[in-house]
Amino acid sequence: MLPPFWTLVEAHGDELLVHARRLAGDSAEDVLQDALLRALRAYPKLRHADHLRAWLYRVTTTTAIDHHRRTRREVLVDEPPVVAAYDTHGDDFEGLIAPLNETAQAALRLRFVDDLDYDGIAERLDCSVEAARQRVSSAVRTLRESYA
């Protein structure tokens, strides 16, 4: 039986905010609010009450990644972005993916920063479309596990 959703928020809200700050920096509160709304909508559909804390972390991580994708798409400037402007302290996408190996980082940048489809990723990484999909999937899974 699932406990009331609010008890989960009370029990894990502070640590989820810290997690969101690591992933999204100044946008952490917006990310957490969106994550909790997503979780609340999905909560009645859960089949069991096992690993609810980990589930909330996963929802928050996915929401942060979606936030990075959205904000990247919203930024339209006349000049190309300066890669050196990325902070490596975990307050942005580069900080988020820093613990991953070079191949995983490249796959995630191509997918979530450059917004390429798997055909484009495969072409840039000189691999098959299936391998490109697997690299992105494995990298996301590794991130979710490391931040859960």
Image (tube, grey):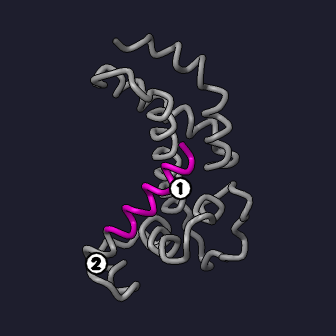
Task: Name the spot of residue 102 as percent of width and height, x first.
Answer: 55, 77
Q: Residue at x 48, y 35 (%)?
A: 54
Task: Work out which residue is located at the far bottom of the displayed protein and give it.
Answer: 126
Image quarter hosting the N terminus: top left
Task: Name the spot of residue 48 as percent of width and height, x first.
Answer: 32, 22
Could you classify mark 2 by the number of other residues whose Cα lies within 10 Å: few (under 14), some (14-19), or many (20 or more)? Answer: some
Numbered circle sitting on residue 82: none
Q: Is residue 125 above or below residue 40?
A: below
Could you classify mark 1 by the number of other residues whose Cα lies within 10 Å: few (under 14), some (14-19), or many (20 or more)? Answer: many
Q: Secondary structure at mark 2?
A: helix
Q: Residue at x 46, y 41 (%)?
A: 58
Q: Is residue 133 above or below residue 19?
A: below
Amino acid identity at mark 2:
Asp
Question: Is the Cβ of the residue at disc 2 closer than 8 Å to that at disc 1?
Answer: no
Q: Residue at x 73, y 64 (%)?
A: 87
Amino acid identity at mark 1:
His
Left or right position of 126 against 13:
left
Residues in magenta, as a range: 134-148
The residue closer to the viewer here, 38 or 139, is 139
Task: Name the spot of residue 10 as percent of width and height, x first.
Answer: 60, 17
The residue indicated by pointer 1 is 68
Task: Name the spot of residue 141 as percent of width and height, x first.
Answer: 43, 55
The residue closer to the viewer here, 112 or 14, is 14
Q: Quadrant of residue 128 in the image?
A: bottom left
The residue indicated by pointer 2 is 119
